[in-house]
Image (cartoon, rainbow, N blue to C red):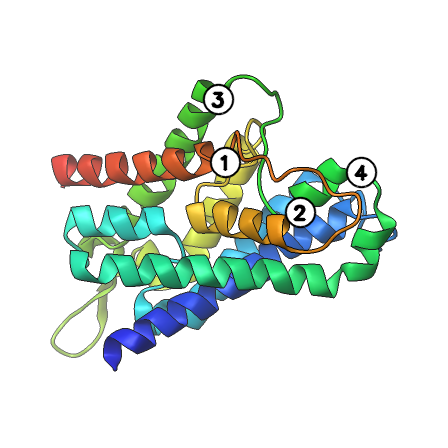
Amino acid sequence: MEMFNQYLFEFLGTMVLILLGDGVCAATGLNRSKAQGAGWIVITMGWGFAVMVGVFIAGSVSGAHLNPAVSIGCAIAGTMAWSAVPGYIIAQMLGGFMGAVLVWLFYKDHYDATEDPDTKLGTFCTMPAIEGHKLRNFFCETVGTWLLVFVILVFGLDANIPTLDAEGAHLHIGMGELGAIPVTCLIMAIGMSLGGATGYAINPARDLAPRIAHAILPMKGKRDSGWAYSWVPVAGPIAGGVLAALTYLLLF
């Protein structure tokens, strides 16, 4: 029952992550939306707050990985059991799919009012800003996810977690005291600094699951779902998560 609850909260946390994250992409991109054209800063902040809300929902039960790359990285680093990884990834993918469906239902009128098929696809998943450089895009996704997973692992170090003396008073307080807030800032920083090339998927459940939803959902005038590129925001984040865990083990 405990594992089921962990999977359930990974599903719920990832669903809300995508509802709010893809939601800000839809709000800023689709025609006749009051937020249309709000820009990159709003998108990166929206994704940061989306992660924060997902962490608040799932953090106390599952640890709020919300990302297969994080789960794989944590397993390599020894902070979670490998036996839990498949269930976490399945829950994350299902949550990502459901979150994308909810965004489509929420903005259905605006999808109908939008003619550009690339804009519609961009509310579901990522595509590179410059086409034709998949290996460089893979590198970008690897670096972005390496930073994400490595810093998440570092957040969990004893030096970043408040320590109490015998009377219960704080001896020191690190960033871990803030819980979801540092991760929110981290997501925003990655998006603002490293998101321009690929849209910073840094999460296979954030990209592949909504891409599948785009392929399945009925939308007039939609394009293909970018399957030729789809391996990049899956393989890159997984590689980044593995490298982050190895870096963590090497240094700490």
Residue depicted at x 46% and y 70%: 12
Element type where label 3 sits in the image: helix
Give the residue pinned by disc 4: 116
Depth-wise, is mark 2 or mark 4 nearer the camera?
A: 4
Give the residue pinned by disc 1: 230
Q: Which residue appears farthest toward the bottom when viewing the image?
A: 1
Q: Name which residue type carries label 4.
A: Asp
Q: CA distance from mark 1 to mark 3?
A: 10 Å
Depth-wise, is mark 1 or mark 2 nearer the camera?
A: 1
User: Can you see residue 177?
Assistant: yes
Q: Say which label, 1 or 3, has the lower sequence index.
A: 3
Question: Do the residues bearing badges 1 and 2 touch, measured as CB atoms within 8 Å?
Answer: no
Residue 43 in the image: x percent, y percent? 65, 46
Q: Name which residue type carries label 1.
A: Ser
Q: Say which label, 1 or 2, has the lower sequence index.
A: 2
Q: Say which label, 3 or 2, has the lower sequence index.
A: 2
Give the residue pinned by disc 2: 123
Q: CA distance from mark 4 to mark 3?
A: 23 Å
Residue 232 in the image: x percent, y percent? 45, 32
Give the residue pinned by disc 3: 134
Q: Name which residue type carries label 3.
A: Lys
